[in-house]
Image (cartoon, coloured by chain):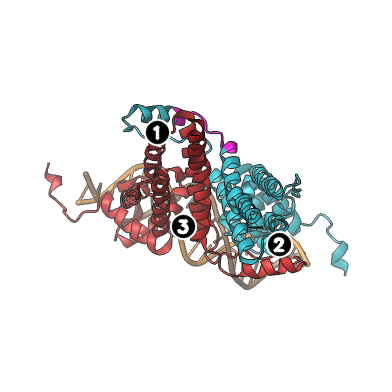
Chain colours: A red, B cyan, C brown, D orange
DNA sequence: ACCTGAACACCGTTCAAGT
DNA sequence: ACCTGAACACCGTTCAAGT
């Protein structure tokens, strides 16, 4: 039709999403307003509604777009346990690179969405480990809960999060611990240690039991 | 002064907090408005500001009050590992009982606040385990991250959270796993298993190494 | 098909003014 | 000391009307 080539610089959903993405990355999700977005695009707010529905839809489309741009995760290593660990570490790194995607997903009640890709990859490795059915589902849930919890907590606590010693730890031991807590905790080491512990319990120990049995 | 006994049914910060708490428990944090609160108290909105400052202050006071009402956690068991596990399980139960406290704390950037009590108790047990200084601080961080992550994730994912199998899992194994994922995952079992794994790695294995060395 | 003006029903917050 | 009216500067959203 004639409208197809007319107004090649017309606004479209993609350009709205572009602007929304820039705005969110600059000022955060809470500061994104339909009116502000319209102004930024040189248009009145009803126009935004015409193109992307409403704010809720806009945010959901933003999530879809942002997660499309998520780097593809490539498991490394030969041992399945090693490969699962690498998937988790890679996803943690990805989410750190895109804090607004985490914020958006959470706000829209779509947090589980963040882990869809990792879920597939981990499931594949679990099967390679020889897990089946309910046992594999349980292991998958455990790993995803551990990973997801870490991602959310890291974002939830203030960035200058310090574990603070309680003032009424009276003993010498307490004071010593308090002093160490004032220092920076190596969050990556915490993640690695606890992840290994979970994987060990779910996979390695199971494998050892299996070998003894046969 | 004379004002002290006059107007015994006058509004005060406590009554404002009472009403706010009821409103939050009924409709959630997002639905709490200063104007609505005023109406509920038979007063105009500036009055609310006079008593509690502003919305931010109101929410922070709400957090303080709600966490005052948090049940005291009593570690059970004789083994320190058992006692730490009981602390974590108890705190998880408490947070489940007060989802709005979790929501509020998160929204105000005070999530770490939720775990203050547990932190003290766990630190005490860690010292009883013979941990010191940096090692104790690390273990404490690991346990709190695990616990905190679980609490936040549980609240973040939709309540009817199911791990869904990807549609393109082509193998029989994949389809079998997918079928099991459709079922309900026993979240409590996941929590228990992963918690034990973390505690084992941090405490039990260390203890074993210690015994071998001496 | 695409855009606007104008309106509705909300917000948080301030402040001079009342008693 | 406690409360209100009125206002400011925002929201998300809808809808008839324009081109």
Of badges 1 and 3, the one in the foreground is 1
Q: Give the image location of residue A131, x and y in percent.
A: 44, 33
Residue A202, above or below A76: above
Q: Is residue A99 left or right of residue A76?
A: right
**Visible residue check, residue B29:** no
The lab-note entry on whether marks 1 and 2 share a chain reads yes
Q: Residue at x 33, y 56 (%)?
A: A44
Residue B85, above or below D1: above
Host chain of mark 1: B
- Which quadrant, please, contains the C terminus of chain B? bottom right
Q: Residues within 10 Å of mark 1 (few under 14, many from 20)?
A: many
Q: Give the image location of residue B40, x and y in percent.
A: 67, 48
- Please give the range of residues in magenta: B180-189
Of badges 2 and 3, the one in the foreground is 3
Q: Is residue A79 left or right of residue A171?
A: left
Q: Residues within 10 Å of mark 3 (few under 14, many from 20)?
A: few
SS label for mark 1: loop
Q: Give the image location of residue B39, x and y in percent.
A: 66, 50
Question: What is the magenta segment's predominant secondary structure?
Answer: helix
Of badges 1 and 2, the one in the foreground is 1
Q: Which residue is mark 2?
A: B51
Q: Which residue is mark 3?
A: A30
Which mark is drawn over residue B165? 1
Residue A187 highlighted magenta (yes or no): no
The lab-note entry on whether marks 1 and 3 share a chain reads no
Q: Is residue A101 left or right of residue B199?
A: left
Depth check, front residue: B189 or B113:
B189
- Which quadrant, please, contains the N terminus of chain B? bottom right
Q: Is residue A199 left or right of residue A63?
A: right
**Visible residue check, residue A177:** yes
């Amino acid at each position: 039709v004639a409208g197809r080539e007319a107004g090649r610089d017309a606004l479209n959903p993609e350009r709205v999403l572009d602007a929304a993405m820039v705005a969110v990355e600059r000022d955060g999700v809470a500061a994104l307003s339909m009116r502000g977005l319209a102004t930024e695009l040189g248009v009145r707010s009803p126009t935004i509604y015409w193109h992307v529905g409403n704010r809720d839809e806009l945010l959901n489309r933003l999530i879809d777009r942002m997660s499309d741009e998520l780097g593809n995760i490539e498991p490394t290593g030969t041992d399945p346990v090693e490969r699962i660990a690498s998937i988790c570490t890679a996803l943690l790194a990805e989410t750190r690179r895109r804090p607004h995607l985490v914020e958006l997903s959470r706000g829209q009640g779509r947090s589980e969405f963040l882990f869809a890709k990792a879920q597939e990859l981990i499931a594949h490795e679990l099967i390679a480990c020889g897990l089946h059915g309910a046992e594999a589902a349980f292991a998958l849930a455990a790993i995803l809960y551990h990973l997801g919890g870490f991602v959310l907590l890291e974002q939830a606590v203030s960035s200058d999060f310090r574990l603070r010693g309680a003032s009424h730890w009276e003993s010498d031991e307490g004071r010593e611990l308090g002093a160490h807590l004032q220092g920076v905790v190596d969050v990556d080491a915490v993640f690695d240690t606890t992840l290994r512990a979970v994987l060990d319990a779910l996979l390695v120990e199971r494998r050892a039991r299996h070998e003894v049995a046969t």
